[in-house]
Amino acid sequence: MDRARSAFCTVSAMYGIGSSKAHLLHLQRNDMFMALCRGIRQAFDPRGIMNPGKWL
């Protein structure tokens, strides 16, 4: 992970970061990006019933 970050790369699967690497997302994205994702999710799913426990 450190080598990828130092080369300005990310670790992800073919269609996104995947649930196995979700705990590493905060290392690849800044706080503003994370807040934006949470805001989008909240706008579309305010009750948290669509795919609970998953990112966008």
Image (cartoon, rainbow, N blue to C red):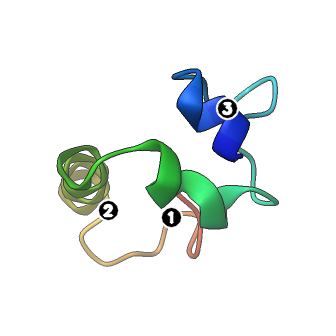
Q: x, y percentage for residue 6? A: 56, 31
> Counting other residues with Cα less than 10 Å from the Cα at mark 1, is it few (<14), some (14-19), or many (20 or more)?
few
- The mark nearer the N terminus, 3 or 1, is 3
Q: Which residue is mark 2?
A: 45
State the residue at coordinates (67%, 32%). 4
Of badges 3 and 1, nearer the viewer stands: 3
C-beta proximity under 8 Å, tags 1 and 2: yes
Secondary structure found at label 1: loop
The label nearer to you, 3 versus 2, is 3
> Residue at horizontal 63%, vertical 67%?
23
**Would you place residue 7 above or below residue 37 in this image?**
above
**Which mark, residue 4?**
3
What is the x, y in percent for residue 47?
30, 78
Q: What kind of residue is marked 2?
A: Asp
Q: CA distance from mark 3 to mark 1?
A: 32 Å
Q: Is residue 45 visible?
A: yes
In this view, the residue in front, 28 or 48, is 28
Q: Position of residue 27 (x, y in %)?
A: 50, 54
* Residue at which label 1 appears: 50
